[in-house]
Amino acid sequence: MNDLSEFKTVPQQWKLVGDISYDLNKPNKSEIKNGTGILVHTPKGQSKNILVSNLEHQNLALEFEFMLAKGSQTTLYLQGRYAIKLNDSWSNYELVSDARMNVCRAPGLWQKMQIFFQAPKFNNSGNKTDDATLLKVVYNGVTIQENVSFKEPSINSPLREEATTGPFMLSSNGAIALKDIHYLQFENPGNIKNLLITAPAENILDRQIIVNPQLKTIVQRCFIEYANKKRTFCAAVGDPDNIHYAIDLSQGTLINFWKGGFIDATSMWTSRGQIQIAVPLGSKFEITPSPNFAMLSNDKETWPEKQSDKFKFKGYKLDASGKPTFLYAVNDFIIEDKIDPQEKGRLLLRTYKISSGNHTNMLWFKLAEGTSIKQVGKDIYSINNDSYYIKYTNDQSSKAILRKTSLGNELIVPLSPSKNQAEIKYSIIW
């Protein structure tokens, strides 16, 4: 993306930029930095805005990252004929296409798409013998379509007559950004079988035991793998709205959150359960499992890597719908931690209630850490290069402090020891 030489038709609405951000709540509102590396579409009137590649492809493996503005609708046409929708179905569920599940991320966040396409085949007489087929579409790490055939070109496709080759095209009536576009042409799907096949969680087992919540929340005590290491004191919590999370109870720390399926429990409940790992399914994020709470003398003191030996897990209680509130103690602070899916699975609302004794040191809470954290709106922070959002409403006594660390940034909040009780609320949005 140093230039636009890969495209033969470039309408004025498409251009290269160095960086971009879209507003979570306002359609098409953006901030752009000059440069190259990111291809953006900015809507302007009703003029023709189809971007056409120089590449005339047959079978194609295509991978790219993209970011949508609120309400944006874009169509990618393989061979200029077969449509894949890139719509903001996070804001509007009615925009979901024929996918197995909705794993679209919020406006202004980077997403990833992988497409494996097999072109139609024709005999020597020019008659079609095999339909064009989507062998697999992987969206944010989740297979959403597999072996879907096109009997004919999609409605409103730029090219109407089927052929063995054609360019890929992008048509948009909203704001969208794309980067890191890679493609691979192949003759036989067998040549890319390692990319097409998703290995089971444990290849020593033939049978999968999938756990999904139906009517109530599920709390599953389990082992969770993080950074190739087994964490043995965890709980995975699954919600019927297909938004889930896992907590390392020894630290009181959220380590995973994801959308889609809940867990693969095969290695927990098959044979002797020797491996015993619950494998999160769906589109997953991992969070560095350092402590959420620490006793600091000031905002310059380094955050500890491990929880204090005075931190204790005190169990959990369930509400009527099965949602847990986890209970902890650190020094003489008592902490209640409840994570509640909101807005039909669009976000997780986390509420801490902290009760204190007469401790004179300051208790601090870490909202987020990452390679990058930037404020992108009122009370909204983008984490890890626009991967997900944290929304935190400041008040006079617990204003969030954004600070640099050796590994990136931290967002921390002081809790005043003069208050016998305090409450922290924040949302994780993705």
Image (cartoon, grey):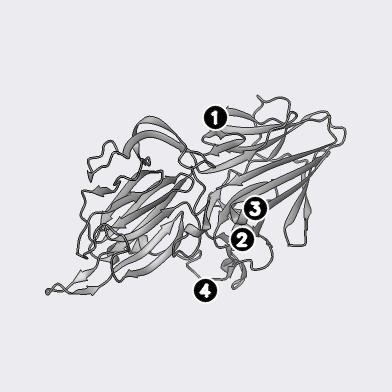
Disc 3 to disc 2, C-alpha distance: 9 Å
Which amino acid does the dot numbered 1 rest on? Ser
Residue at which label 4 appears: 207
**What residue lies at 60% left-to-right and 55% top-to-bottom?**
345
- Packing grade of label 1 (10 A; few <14, some 14-19, many >=20) is few
Residue at which label 1 appears: 406
**What residue lies at 62% left-to-right and 33% top-to-bottom?**
411
Query: Which of 134/75 is in front?
Result: 75
Which amino acid does the dot numbered 4 rest on? Arg
Residue 202's label in the rendered image is none
Q: Within the image, what quadrant is residue 233 found in?
A: bottom right
> Could you say where residue 137 lies in the image, as x and y percent from the top left?
39, 61
Query: Which of 197/97 is in front?
Result: 97
Callouts 1 and 4 close, C-beta under 8 Å? no
Q: Callout 2: helix, strand or loop? A: loop
The earlier-in-sequence mark between 3 and 1 is: 3
Q: Within the image, what quadrant is residue 320 found in?
A: bottom right
**Quadrant of the rendering where the N terminus is positioned:** top left
Disc 3 to disc 1, C-alpha distance: 34 Å
Callouts 3 and 1 close, C-beta under 8 Å? no
